[in-house]
Image (cartoon, rainbow, N blue to C red):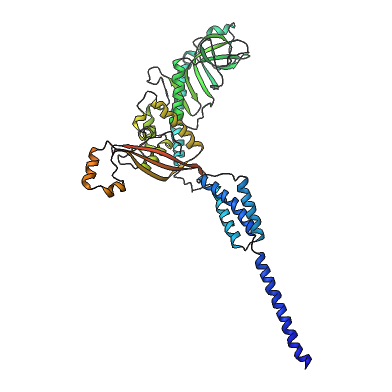
Amino acid sequence: MRLLSGRPRGLASAVLAILFAVLSASWAASAAEKAPPNDVTKAEHYLRKLEDHARRARGAAFKPGYEDNEALKRIKELKEKYPDDPAVEALFARARTALMGSKGDFIEITPEMLRYRDQEKKIVELFSKEAVAQIAAWKAKASAGGKLLAQALPAPGLREPAAAGMPGKYVVLDKVEYPANQFTDLGREYLSWGTPARGLYYVQLDTPPWRGAYEALKRYRRLVNAGLAEGTPFTVAGRIESAELTVPEAGKKRLGGAFWGWVVVPEVIWVDGLAFAAADRNAELGGRFAGEERIEEIKGPLYSVKAIPPDVTPERLVETFATAIKEKNLKLYLDCIDPKFLGGPRAKSLAMYHWDWHQVRFRDFYVHVTIDKVEKTVVKGYDAGNDLESFFLTDEQKAQARKISEPSVERATVTTKAWDERGRQYGSPKPHELIRRGGGRWYVFDFAAQF
């Protein structure tokens, strides 16, 4: 009986011991799944720095720094050791969001957004046809009567018999590098071409023909083909005037020798297959590029926006401003700008300077612009949209306030985001200042601001 009665007690004890052991292991495992609070706090301290970095970037991509990576490293270690801890999981989710923020905001770039690039190619092709035809025409005219040299090099030396026939001839100088080979001597400005061993030519730069032709080439670049970078080698052709002894070096301390060279008065400049620019003393600007007289006739049909309506909104005006730059619609670009900035003697030059920079940015840095937010304020005159004043004033008082107030001046800040061809946000959002006077049309006030 003692044995029988002892068995249940022994079995019960064993069951209780096993149950206790299982519960203890479960409790221990549960406790092991929780990360030490101090480690969680330290990881969150660094995570907040990463989140703040992403917030300050305002959608722009950035490379995580030391503290940013410290946050990721600490959270990675916690996640691997305590995968089921809710606190660790919350840190992991926040870190993933912040890390993705370091890659920058992004959108899908559609073919319509890149249409202006295809349009530029079409425009370049149209003007290229004009250039090719005019290059051929100039060569044919210069060749008449055997006046065009078959080749520029080798050039005859000053004391050689052939030298007597050089003045009055026309010469074509290929792959000219400007301003790399520019120099001055005794108050005259030249561009050297060739070598002392095979012959030198000195293109006169301090002449109206050079300025007329070169400025025309610059207009071609800014109005037709922004891809033709400044400094691209080009061809200069002109008439040989005389021979000159000079030191073809730039700078005050010229250490090289003096060499005889043939002085060339330039007439035309061209880039094979792309552009042709000619000096023209009768033209208002002193020169023209091939097709310039028909520029609006050629480009006009390709413009997507042709005019600005009187009731244009600030956001629509900024979009139009960007479109004018992308489509090289100079008239529309200038029509967007506050007329007060275009009235001075150097105002147009400043506007064109920033036009050139806008062209570079839309070519090299970003391809599309979106509106982020718009804020409007009345800086002068009666503000009909002021809720506080409307609450206190009667209709009669409002009418009187409107009557005695000076003409209104309103300002609008339109914040934009720019996107590169991969769809990533370029830089941070940029503000653009607009102005409206007397309830008229909105104009771009800060036309220098980049997108």
Q: Quadrant of the C terminus?
A: top left
Residue 263 position (above or below residue 395): above
- Of 405 and 201, the residue lying toward us: 405
* Residue 18 x, y percent position in the rendering: 72, 78
Identified at 31% across, 48% down, the residue is 388
Query: Where's residue 37, x and y in %?
Result: 62, 59
Q: From the viewer's perspective, is residue 367 above or below residue 224?
A: below
User: Position of 442 compared to 322: left or right?
Assistant: left
437 shown above or below 99: above
Image point 57% across, 59% down: which residue? 90
| Residue found at x 22% / y 43% | 399
144, 4: nearer the viewer: 4
**Residue 312 location in percent, x, y?**
33, 41
The image shows residue 445 at horizontal and vertical percentages of 38, 35
Farthest front residue in view: 392
Would residue 390 be visible to someone looking at this image?
A: yes
Q: Residue furthest left?
A: 396
